[in-house]
Amino acid sequence: MKIVTTIAEFRQVRRGYGFESVGFVPTMGYLHEGHLELIRRARTENERVVASIFVNPKQFSPTEDLSRYPRDLDRDFHMLAGENVDLVFVPSNEVMYPPDYQTTVSVSRVTQALEGLRRPTHFDGVTTVVAKLFNIVQPSRAYFGQKDAQQSVVIRQMVRDLNFDLEIVVCPTVRESDGLAMSSRNKYLTEDERKGATVLYKALQSAKSIWDGGTRNSGILRAAMMETLSEELLARVDYISAADPVTLEEWHGEIPRDSGLLLSMAVFFGQTRLIDNLLLE
Ligand code: PAF
């Protein structure tokens, strides 16, 4: 496994891959099983696998957890080598955003709801860094987790709008045995918060069982999630949503029979903000 830190070095190695297919997994490091599943999927579908590790400052607001975002590069390299990754790109802030850096990539509509509403500058940061990484890596396919449902929708939109010549592959959320979605931020949870955090998945499941029973009323589905969440005293709900999975617009009243549903939520445990979602067809 080769590890490179500059764009020039990266391009030199990348050129050696010629016309081989390249699967790309962008990450912010502190890897977990969810990332490894993306890598494994990329491994089965491509001749080469490239990962990046970059904690992107542009997607954190000044009040968010950039400085305390967990980092452990040695552990990450060990895990990536174990998955037979060919090349890892680990740029510094100066490599990605030199002092005269001036460009932002911004997707307008699907960034407005859900996470975008609560974190207004977040998706500009994500699309800017992902566009830069796509231009550097030149992948055939790029892999993202369903856990960040809106991020996948936003990136797909950017790829369509800017004619990036690659396929976006969205892989299922990987969960702990008690249902908690894997996330680097789970590390911040105290023992009690960690126990309580299973309530996100329980809330999604409570709405799903109502949906499976034939109920299409979005208000009832949201109420079911809220009721389950309110049973956990440590949970502070930021939002719950029952939205169209394509436009991300909130459903009101009855959901049309031929439409899908994205159930999603953000919930605070102390200072830690967890998100989760379930896509129902
Ligand atoms: O999902 C993430 O870890 C990040 O948002 C990404 C896609 C690596 C961009 O920084």
Image (spheres, rainbow, N blue to C red):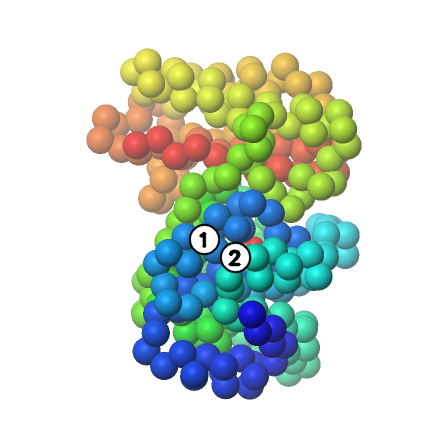
The dot on residue 40 is: 1
Residue contact between numbered discs 1 and 2, judged by CB atoms under 8 Å: yes
Q: Percent x, y for residue 222? A: 47, 22
Above or below 251: residue 207: above
Instruction: Judge by depth and name the residue closer to the eye, 70 or 240.
Output: 70
Question: Label 2 crowding class (10 Å Cα cut-off): few <14, some 14-19, many 20+?
Answer: some
Find ligand 1 in the image and state its quadrant.
bottom right
Type of residue at label 2? Glu
Q: Percent x, y for residue 167? A: 33, 61
Q: Is residue 3 visible?
A: yes
Residue 236 figure quarter:
top right
| Mark 1 vs ligand 1: CB below 8 Å | no
- Look at the numbered disc 1 and give the secondary structure of its residue: helix
Left or right position of 63 against 2: right
Left or right position of 238 against 169: right
Q: Percent x, y for residue 138? A: 41, 74
The dot on residue 90 is: none
Above or below 163: residue 155: above
Type of residue at label 1? Arg
Left or right position of 162 against 31: left
Q: Residue at x 64, y 59 (%)?
A: 78
